[in-house]
Amino acid sequence: MGHDQLNYLIRLLSSKGVQFAEGLTDYEVFAIERKFSIVFPPDLKMFLMHVLPVGSSFIDWRAGLVDVSVEKSIITKLNWPLHGMLFDVRENGFWLDEWGAKPEDLGLQELNVKSLYASYPKLVPVYAHRYISSQPNMPGNPVISINQTDIIYYGFDLADYFAREFRFLLDSSFDKLDQPIREIRFWSSMTG
């Protein structure tokens, strides 16, 4: 996403009522990535350094650096996909073939899922329960919606996601996508 596209996207989001604070500084990005053990993919990083969306469903990354309650809410958001998966393992018998033989013991099932989850590309919350993968560290990763193990594509890249979430059309300077640009290890298979 180029700067002209970014500015256009921000204008569209503003027209839908999204409010913005000053973008994150280089230092804030560094501190956030370090504190929360995440890596912002380049397009999300560029967006957040240009403007920081504010509101109840957006992540208040800046406040997470100084406010313990906001820090805890960010950690909760970061753990949401794992906790949803564990809920479905525990309550709904969810188990993927790729995880191997399902242990009889629920504690072992959860331990296996936690171990495997740690090897998957880390997800970064964007808005509400919408996430973008930090890997590969390239622009154009799809945005997924996660509710336990009900996982769907919600945007084929960040701009497409914002257009879908906030119901506006992108102009011809944006690629028209009818599928994700790339597959994200593990997470793309969960959207099936």
Image (cartoon, helix red, strand yellow):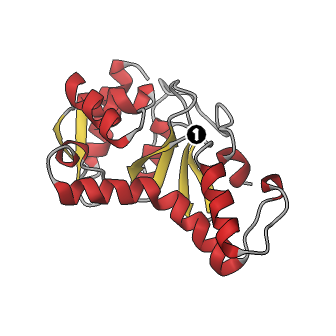
Q: Is residue 148 visible?
A: no
Q: Position of residue 72 (x, y in %)?
A: 28, 58
Residue 5: x, y in percent? 38, 25
Residue name at image x 66 percent, y 32 percent: 182
Q: Name the foreground residue: 90 vs 174.
A: 90
Residue located 47% across and 53% down the image: 130
Q: Nearer the viewer, residue 79 or 5?
A: 79
| Amino acid type at image mark 1 | Pro
Residue 71: percent from left, percent from top: 25, 53
Question: Foreground: 3 or 57?
Answer: 57
Residue 150's place in the image compared with 174, above or below, is: below
Left or right, 26 with respect to 166, comes to: left
User: What residue is disc 1 on?
Assistant: 121
Q: Nearer the viewer, residue 134 or 67?
A: 67
- Regarding residue 83, the answer to whether it shows in the image is yes
Location of the C terminus by quadrant is bottom right
Please give the count of numbered marks on the rendered protein: 1
Under circle 1, the secondary element is loop
Q: Residue at x 63, y 61 (%)?
A: 111
Q: Is residue 89 left or right of residue 28?
A: right
182 displayed left or right of 123 = right
Asked whether, in this view, residue 118 is left or right of residue 71, the answer is right
Q: Position of residue 127 (x, y in %)?
A: 38, 52
Where is 62 relative to 135, above or below?
below
The image quadrant of residue 53 is top left
- Residue plotted at (44% across, 23% down): 1
